[in-house]
Amino acid sequence: MTECITDPIDFASVSRKKIQADFNGGRLTSDAGTLLLREVDRYLGLIDQLNDCIPDPRNPAWVVHQQRTLLAQRIFGLALGYEDLNDHHTLRDDPLFQTITERGRWDDRPLASPPTLCRLENRITRESLVRMARVFVEQFIASYRQTPPEELILDFDATDDRVYGHQVGRFFHGYYDHYCFLPLYVFCGDQLLVSYLRTSQIDAAPPSRAILKLLVTRFRQVWPQVRIIFRGDSGFCRWRLMRWCDRHEVGYVIGLAQNAVLLRKAERWTTRAQERFEQTGEKQRLFSAFRYAAQTWDRPRRVIVKAERLCEGPNTRFVVTTLAELPQVLYDKVYCQRGEMENRIKEQPLYLYADRTSCHEFPANQFRLLLSSAAYVLVEALRRIGLKETALAQAQVHTIRLRLFKVAARVCSSVRRIVFHFCSRYPWQALFRQVAHRLRRCPRPCLEFR
């Protein structure tokens, strides 16, 4: 513990009033709102499920910090915006963290240090990572415990994760023009299903086909009649993936890169859009559909064309699909909705530090990615359950963090209870009470692993 200096600090006066500050306020925390995340975790059982996936080889007689406590430290820390292990040099003494990690008793013992947390990261095996990845899928299934879904749209997308060292698996990617990993994300709506770290020298389609097969198999075990649709950009437009979808009754809406044949087939509509633009001077959008098969495809498929003429020039796009909706409806109401999934992906490195893959070994970096994903799952569940039909129902992670988590409080503890005294002028206290009440009365979902 840092030695407490009682001498006051003097500041410039205001209206002849002397201003001083000291560090004698007692046990305080600036993250008291994280109590809500703890309630979410108790509702989901997420950290317990992840902890069960990781064997602990340590001798129990010498263990000071339980493995579950280490996981809670890292996941709650990421959710609060503490991206580095070094942050836990100070967080280990925070009274809030000492409470939400549920060590088993309340005292002044510091939590785990950064070296202890680092050792956890570097002893993770690939088998443990597979079991952890399965937890996210089961959490998603449990979220539909009351009403089974009629349709699931699975959004697949990859993003670059820039690396600066010599980590195992790093490669130079020509499109992004730097050394990076290419993690693959799968979302259904706002809920995260898969976060899979990949090296950047491989094509996106083969692992995507394997992951899609696993997801479809599991979902149809639970919901045999559910309609499943695969949605992705042109990086996933591979005939083997589409053939697998055709054979297993999985619909798809996939972007299709331009080529000379496609542009020639769409010339009728692009020419008409150009003529209308020249007549009116306003943006023009025309939609249609035709059959097309690339030379490597196994058969022709339905392709939607958007012939758009903007002031900046033509903007022609193509989508290959099995769906029967009208071309404009399918493009605007189905395909373009994947943009919301891209917003969810942007939250991962920006606000949950999924790009902090600076470990040398590849499994350790995959583990860090899963920890970031776990933090997202907690915040998303808080948004979906606690913030439903409120002003923050569609808020991003950083907005929820600033308004609900980053709240100062004085901590008073006794033998029987721990009390967090929030500021009486906290502007979001009505919403805070509402969210806490909702989380406390929610029945815990049943997780069934098969």
Image (cartoon, helix red, strand yellow):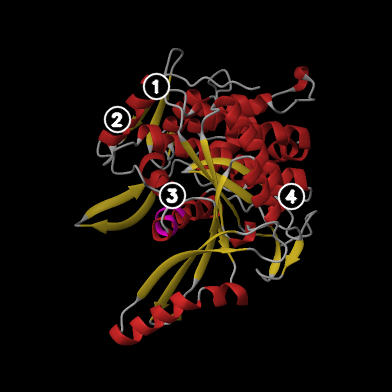
Give how far apart the Cα atoms at labels 2 and 3 are.
Answer: 20 Å
Badge 2 or badge 1: first in the primary sequence: 2
Give how far apart the Cα atoms at labels 1 and 3 are.
Answer: 25 Å
Q: Secondary structure at mark 2?
A: helix
Dot 3: within a 10 Å radius of its alpha carbon, few (fewer than 14), some, or many (20 or more) residues? some
Given this view, does label 4 or label 2 mark the residue nearer the observer? Answer: 2
Identify which residue is drawn at 33% across, 25% down: 437
Give how far apart the Cα atoms at labels 4 and 2 are.
Answer: 40 Å
Identify which residue is drawn at 73% across, 23% down: 63
Given this view, does label 1 or label 3 mark the residue nearer the observer? Answer: 1
Badge 1 or badge 3: first in the primary sequence: 3
What amino acid does circle 2 point to? Gln
Given this view, does label 4 or label 1 mark the residue nearer the observer? Answer: 1
Compared to residue 392, the image places residue 26 above or below, namely above
Q: Are marks 1 and 3 in contact (CB under 8 Å)?
A: no
Identify which residue is drawn at 36% across, 46% down: 394
Q: Is residue 358 visible?
A: no
Residue on which disc 3 sits: 398
Q: Are marks 4 and 1 in contact (CB under 8 Å)?
A: no
Give how far apart the Cα atoms at labels 3 and 4 are.
Answer: 25 Å
What amino acid does circle 4 point to? Cys
Residue on which disc 4 sits: 359
Start and end of the magenta stretch?
330-334
Q: Secondary structure at mark 4?
A: loop
